[in-house]
Amino acid sequence: MAKRYVQTLDLRDDPDMIREYRKWHSKEFHWKEIRDGIKAVGILEMEIYILGTRLVMIVDAPDDFDWKVAMDKLATMPRQAEWEAFVAKLQGCNPDARSDEKWQMMERMFYLY
């Protein structure tokens, strides 16, 4: 069994910036240190979906996962602060904001049993 977290964030409404954001999240251009850091804090899987400027991120983690502890650790991982500042200009966020300060946690309101 795993915990699932769903978050949302809006990108700047600029087609060039959206293309750039997609590029830096591709397998070809991603920063290896960021993927390694995500795994190192215990995240099992992470997916990001896009529709226009709206992003939705789904994070699966073990049952004993503590979101705050993991985000505190993630913020100290190699290149994480650099990455957050880099993508903040495409997201329209404060360049000093951590990932957990930018992405807004969504509430599940329906579940098909």
Image: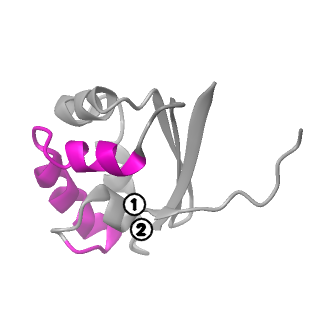
- Residue at horizontal 21 percent and vertical 29 percent from the top: 32
Residue 50 location (% of width, % of height): 55, 54
Element assignment for label 1: helix
The three-letter code of the residue at mark 2 reads Leu
Q: Does the magenta run of residues contain 106?
A: no
Residue 81 included in the magenta stretch of the image: yes
Residue at horizontal 24%, vertical 60%? 98
Among the 4 quarters of the image, the one containing residue 15 = bottom left
Magenta stretch, main secondary structure class: helix
Residue at 17 percent across and 69 percent down: it is 95
Question: Which numbered marker is on residue 18?
Answer: 1
Q: Residues within 10 Å of mark 2 (few under 14, many from 20)?
A: many
Establish if 91 lies above or below 32: below
Q: Which residues are magenta?
A: 67-94
Q: Residue furthest right?
A: 113
**SS class, disc 2:** loop
Residue 33 percent coordinates (x, y): 17, 32
Q: Residue 80's x, y, as percent?
A: 17, 46
- Residue 16 seen anywhere in this rendered image of the structure: no
Question: Which sits in the foreground, 38 or 82?
Answer: 38
- Front residue (pair 10, 16): 10
Q: Amino acid at mark 1?
A: Ile
